[in-house]
Image: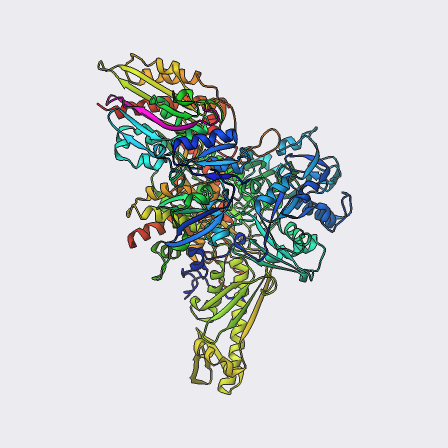
């Protein structure tokens, strides 16, 4: 790796100061499982690496009846080892258990996964369908945006130089709501998604779908919030007919490319298949 | 403030206090191999896909090629070199020998540390759980048969 | 002296002792190549071509030379051979130029990642940075990366001056370096008489051995002009030979110390870094220089296995007897000629007794790394083709696949299609064992929800090699025996070799202290490869042990003041034939060895013309998700003839390991080439080898049909297991989904395509 300076601030303010000072020649370090690979590969030529793991807010993990708050540096294992979070948010556990393998999950977290901003990031679609909000702090102050607006292109996002992702906030939508994420990979672990779909459903008091969200991974320049497919489910009876229709629509809302992980046809086909599967899974998790 | 100067790292490795200076960009793997002199952890890919560099930091297994040495200041690091004791080999090491769980042996330190990470927390894992836990460690020689058997044997003996 | 018995009860052979290097390897103490530390060590880095096909116009190393911390810079100009012109100068020089250019290109780039220059600096980062400052001007040429495109009329030509040898005819302006033909009988006539004919064309992609340990070399060129090299290699003497050839020096000037090696599978036989490290060492003022290859470069610039196009045509009579076979095997040589077509030709129809056959082999250069051996080079590719066609024919005849193979089985006395007559071989025994196996007899069972299951079977063959090995033995006064040999130990061979000497000497193998020596301390040994080590070096150990017995008999004669011919030996005890009271154990004799003339030692050498060929048959059940194409192996059994299994746990290890490599080859592994001729997936992330979660336990069944050419009947085991899996999985997929697969890897997208679920 080419040399850089290292610092481990203990407050958000300090971190923002250093990041602002160095601009795009400094990057925050959480788990390091993307950043170190990228520095080695020459993608970044950095003056400084800012270790954010000593900042309390970024390590916070709190879950109550209102919301789940995940600090940007919280690694995957803390999420899936939490019994209450596992019970309340199985769709997030789907993602946390999928990113890399055990060694990666000891270090990598949703914050870094989101900031890495690849369309294949396994946590991003699950966060989108949970209506997650990203809490950001920079030299100009704080701001919060929906996760589906965070990524702007392959590897790029809305963060300005000097801005730091601090935490993710997920609203608790009650017991008639649940979600699921499934990705297709050729092996059983360690792969990047060929295609992935996250779905969530909220069942209304009339037993019909009150709201639904579908998000697609690895089939466009960013993770895609499949608006049309999501809206197609509103007011429908949850089940095969509605889900199949949603799958067919989701297939039209993506723009995959052909690369070493899959072809265009394959990815579109998988979007359809996985949409149906994750909608079924979400429904199953709601139970009753 | 961010410094390019060497960082003074005070850590505990295999239960022993270790102190050394390292440039900020030096990985934990390189610090172990080149500075501390523990070459048991191996370089296989340098991008977190093979697990040959696996060590334990504060009881959690990590790919040491993706950890900066600077990050283990004040932390506990355990490597394969710390598994045996004055009483002899760790049951996992013994089981690996008895079950012929190594052929070329280059992946063995990583597997041992990973397996220990599992058995330290889950004393009776199923075969499926073992295979899942070890999926981040690649072996090209054995086909994993005997590695799984060795972990199961060690679980019984622990 | 060859002494073979089919049903012998051995004391040591056939047991599973703890391997002698085991403690060091489970504690992390064992020193592998990259672990070497020397005083004053500096690091090297190699600059590589970003283009797949190019002419080197100029190299400017001045910026690198000026950098702080840089000790030396080199290019191909630093090699002694000044011959930079390609000419028809005779085979030796042509090959040397190719070998040298593959290590460091002189005038032309033949594949992306080919080495162009190298730097030695105080640390790895500085060396990498300095290398990146070297300015190379390339004239980029159009590249070609598969055999079909390379053999088209307007294909870019890799070697302007290559004289292709096409069935004896000299051909210019071609990418086909050689076309060979082998055969017996009259296949054209026989095909006309055949009742059923199946003819198919198969494609396979380039794949990599995937050894977890990167290539490495440390070299020290000293003031006396001697070079010491420390490296992880499959053959220290081969490294010495190659380095001295390139550096044009006598073999005694180079000493190669082989460290422990982290996997090779054939890929660590060729050298890449040693000559570079040596010259950098000299140019840096005789400092020791270490180089370790990055994973990306291992993929794009070492010696992967060739992909290619293989056609197989087989014709049967009405009873299912194969009466004609034809095959055209086109394999990728990579950037320089020399694809493994010879071996593929020998193996393609090996399991079958076919009286009329013709097999053509094409050695095709393409802009990819120079291909090399990956366990049984050429045989897995050939088996994919032939075993799939055999499966189709078996079905046409309504025959069980094992019955079809038994009906047509090659055996002792059968003339192989390339002309060689089989000695005693275990093809039929392996097939019978497959038939009797639990797996074959078990019902298919119910797959998991959403999957369909199928079962397939395929056979494979490898001839195994013999060649030269030496073992030296020394008796220690405590009754232990030092065993020095030169075969680097990839998977327990220092023990399997010791076990054979232990059996002869009638002592336990724990009494042995085996050492893999270097080129100055070990007797000559050819590579650890070709499945020859337990076989040939073991044979040398047997001879050394027998010679040691003769030496020790003389010592007893001295001890007892009798004639040597009145001393005999049996089962670890020396005794006087004329006086039963006079006897002494090996251990007791060792204690007295000083009194009888000093230390006792012996040596044994072999130079074996061939190995004992071996067959394997694999059975696999696969579960396929018809919606996604995802395929999981539900059950796998590998049956193989080991001749005699000296060290059974390790024989099973070779079988399981090779089978798993074949599973990866069948389902996922490939070089995915971009349009610019580069490999896109140069990382273990996207070059997907099986993980522990991708596999069930691989069941292994050892069959023993002892090899008459070895004192214990050993047949090499390392390479056969990679031959059957690709076809076995293809045949299982057919059973599951009803469609045939003619292209590997049979990855999910391809399965969906073959099923008609997606266009492409």
Report x, y in % for residue A131: 34, 21
Report x, y in % for residue C548: 53, 73
Say if the magenta span includes residue A173.
yes
Which of these two is toward me, C206 or C258? C258
Which of these two is toward me, C413 or C425? C425
Determine whether, in the image, residue B143 is placed left or right of residue C533.
Answer: left
Magenta residues, start to end: A159-180
**Corner quadrant of residue C440:** top left
Report x, y in % for residue B118: 33, 46
State the quadrant of the C terminus of chain A: top left
* Residue B138 appears anywhere in the view: no
Say if the magenta span includes residue C438.
no
Q: How is the image coloured?
A: rainbow
Would you place residue C49 above or below residue C570 in this image? above
Determine whether, in the image, residue C586 is placed left or right of residue A167.
Answer: right
Q: Residue furthest top?
A: A235
Would you place residue C755 above or below residue B42 in this image? above
């Amino acid at each position: 790796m080419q040399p850089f300076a290292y610092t481990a601030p203990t407050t958000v303010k300090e971190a923002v100061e250093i990041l602002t000072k160095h601009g795009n020649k400094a990057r925050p370090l959480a788990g390091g499982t993307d950043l170190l690979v990228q520095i080695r590969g020459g993608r970044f030529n950095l003056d400084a690496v800012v270790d954010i793991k000593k900042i309390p807010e970024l390590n916070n993990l709190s879950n109550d009846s209102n919301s789940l708050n995940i600090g940007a540096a919280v690694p995957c294992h803390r999420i899936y080892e939490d019994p209450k979070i596992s019970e309340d948010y199985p769709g997030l556990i789907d993602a946390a258990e999928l990113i890399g393998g055990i060694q990666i999950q000891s270090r990598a977290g949703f914050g870094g996964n989101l900031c890495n901003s690849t369309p294949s990031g396994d946590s991003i679609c699950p966060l989108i369908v949970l209506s997650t909000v990203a809490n950001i702090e920079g030299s100009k102050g704080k701001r919060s945006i929906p996760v589906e607006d965070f990524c702007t292109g392959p590897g790029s996002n809305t963060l300005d130089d000097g801005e730091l992702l601090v935490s993710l906030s997920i609203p608790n939508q009650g017991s008639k709501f649940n979600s699921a994420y499934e990705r297709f990979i050729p092996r059983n672990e360690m792969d990047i998604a060929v295609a992935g779909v996250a779905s969530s459903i909220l069942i209304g008091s009339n037993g019909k779908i009150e709201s639904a969200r579908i998000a697609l991974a690895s089939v466009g320049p960013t993770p895609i919030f499949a608006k049309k497919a999501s809206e197609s489910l509103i007011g429908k009876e949850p089940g095969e007919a509605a889900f199949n229709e949603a799958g067919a629509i989701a297939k039209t809302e993506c723009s995959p490319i052909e690369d070493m992980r899959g072809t265009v046809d394959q990815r579109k086909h998988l979007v359809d298949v996985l949409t149906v599967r994750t909608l079924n899974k979400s429904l199953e998790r709601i139970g009753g | 403030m961010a410094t390019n100067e060497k960082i003074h790292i005070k850590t505990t490795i295999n239960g022993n206090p270790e102190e050394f200076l390292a440039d900020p960009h030096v990985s934990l793997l390189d610090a172990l191999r080149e500075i501390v002199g523990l070459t048991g952890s191996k370089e296989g890919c340098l991008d977190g896909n093979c697990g040959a560099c696996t060590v334990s930091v504060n009881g959690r297994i990590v790919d040491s090629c993706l950890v900066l040495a600077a990050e283990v200041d004040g932390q506990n690091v355990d490597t394969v070199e710390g598994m045996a004791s004055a009483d002899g080999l760790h049951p996992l090491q013994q089981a690996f020998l008895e079950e012929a769980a190594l052929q070329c042996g280059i992946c063995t330190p990583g597997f041992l540390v990973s397996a220990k990470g599992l058995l330290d927390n889950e004393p009776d894992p199923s075969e499926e759980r073992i295979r899942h836990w070890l999926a981040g460690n690649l072996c090209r020689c054995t086909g994993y048969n005997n590695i799984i058997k060795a972990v199961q044997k060690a679980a019984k003996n622990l | 002296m060859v002494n073979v018995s089919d049903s012998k009860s051995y004391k040591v052979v056939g047991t599973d002792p703890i391997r002698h290097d085991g403690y060091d390897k489970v504690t992390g103490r064992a020193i592998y190549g990259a672990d070497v530390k020397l005083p004053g060590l500096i690091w090297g880095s190699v600059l590589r071509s970003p283009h797949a096909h190019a002419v080197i116009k100029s190299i400017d190393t001045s910026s690198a030379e000026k950098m702080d911390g840089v000790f030396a810079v080199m290019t191909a100009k630093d090699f002694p051979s000044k011959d930079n012109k390609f000419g028809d100068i005779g085979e030796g020089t042509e090959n040397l130029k190719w070998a040298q250019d593959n290590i460091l290109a002189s005038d032309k780039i033949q594949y992306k990642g080919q080495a162009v220059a190298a730097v030695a600096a105080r640390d790895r980062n500085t060396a990498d940075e300095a290398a990146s400052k070297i300015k190379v001007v390339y004239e980029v040429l159009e590249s070609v990366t598969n055999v079909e495109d390379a053999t088209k009329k307007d294909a870019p030509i890799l070697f302007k001056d290559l004289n292709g040898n096409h069935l004896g005819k000299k051909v210019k302006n071609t990418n086909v370096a050689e076309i060979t033909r082998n055969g017996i009988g009259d296949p054209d006539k026989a095909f006309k008489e055949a009742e059923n004919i199946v003819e198919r064309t198969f494609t396979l992609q380039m794949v990599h051995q995937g050894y977890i340990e990167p290539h490495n070399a440390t070299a020290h060129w000293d003031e006396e002009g001697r070079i010491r090299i420390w490296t992880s290699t499959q053959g220290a003497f081969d490294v010495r030979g190659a380095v001295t050839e390139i550096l044009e020096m006598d073999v005694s000037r180079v000493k190669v110390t082989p460290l422990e090696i982290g996997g090779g599978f054939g890929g660590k036989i060729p050298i890449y870094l040693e000559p570079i490290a040596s010259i950098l060492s000299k140019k840096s003022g005789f400092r020791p220089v270490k180089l370790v290859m990055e994973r990306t470069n291992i993929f794009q610039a070492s010696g992967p296995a060739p992909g290619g196009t293989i056609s197989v045509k087989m014709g049967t009579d009405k009873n299912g007897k194969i009466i004609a076979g034809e095959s055209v095997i086109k394999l990728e040589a990579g950037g320089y000629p020399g694809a493994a077509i010879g071996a593929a030709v020998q193996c393609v129809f090996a399991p079958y007794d076919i009286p009329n056959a013709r097999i053509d082999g094409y050695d095709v250069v393409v802009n990819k790394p120079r291909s090399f051996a990956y366990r049984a080079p050429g045989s897995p590719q050939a088996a994919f083709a032939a075993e799939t066609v055999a499966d189709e024919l078996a079905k046409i005849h309504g025959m069980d696949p094992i019955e079809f193979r038994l009906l047509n089985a090659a055996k002792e006395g059968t003339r192989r299609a390339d002309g060689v007559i089989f000695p005693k071989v275990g093809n039929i025994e392996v097939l019978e064992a497959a038939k009797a196996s639990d797996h074959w007899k078990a019902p298919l069972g119910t797959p998991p929800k959403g999957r369909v299951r199928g079962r397939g079977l395929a056979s494979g063959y490898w001839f195994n090699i013999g060649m030269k090995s030496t073992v030296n033995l020394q008796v220690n006064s405590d009754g232990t025996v030092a065993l020095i040999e030169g075969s680097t130990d990839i998977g327990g061979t220092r023990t399997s070799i010791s076990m054979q000497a232990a059996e002869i000497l009638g002592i336990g193998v724990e009494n042995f202290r085996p050492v893999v020596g270097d080129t100055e301390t070990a007797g000559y040994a050819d590579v650890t490869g070709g499945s020859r080590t337990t076989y040939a070096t073991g044979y040398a150990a047997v001879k050394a042990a027998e010679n040691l017995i003769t030496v020790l008999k003389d010592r007893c004669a001295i001890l007892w003041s009798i004639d040597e011919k009145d001393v005999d030996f049996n089962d670890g005890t020396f005794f006087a034939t004329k006086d039963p009271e006079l006897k002494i154990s090996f251990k007791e004799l060792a204690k007295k060895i000083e009194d009888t003339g000093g230390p006792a030692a012996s040596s044994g050498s072999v130079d074996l013309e061939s190995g004992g060929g071996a067959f394997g048959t694999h059975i696999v059940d696969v579960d396929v998700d018809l919606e996604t194409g995802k395929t999981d192996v539900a059950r796998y059994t590998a049956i193989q003839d080991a001749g005699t299994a000296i060290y059974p746990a390790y024989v099973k290890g070779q079988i399981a390991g090779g089978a798993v490599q074949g599973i990866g080859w069948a389902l996922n592994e490939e070089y995915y080439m971009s349009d610019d001729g580069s490999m896109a997936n140069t990382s273990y992330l996207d070059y997907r080898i099986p993980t522990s979660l991708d596999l069930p336990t691989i069941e292994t069944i050892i069959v023993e049909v002892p090899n008459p050419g070895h004192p214990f009947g050993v047949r090499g085991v390392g390479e056969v297991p990679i031959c059957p899996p690709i076809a076995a999985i293809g045949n299982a997929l057919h059973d599951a989904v009803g469609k045939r697969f003619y292209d590997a890897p049979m990855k999910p997208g391809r399965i969906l395509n073959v099923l008609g679920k997606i266009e492409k």
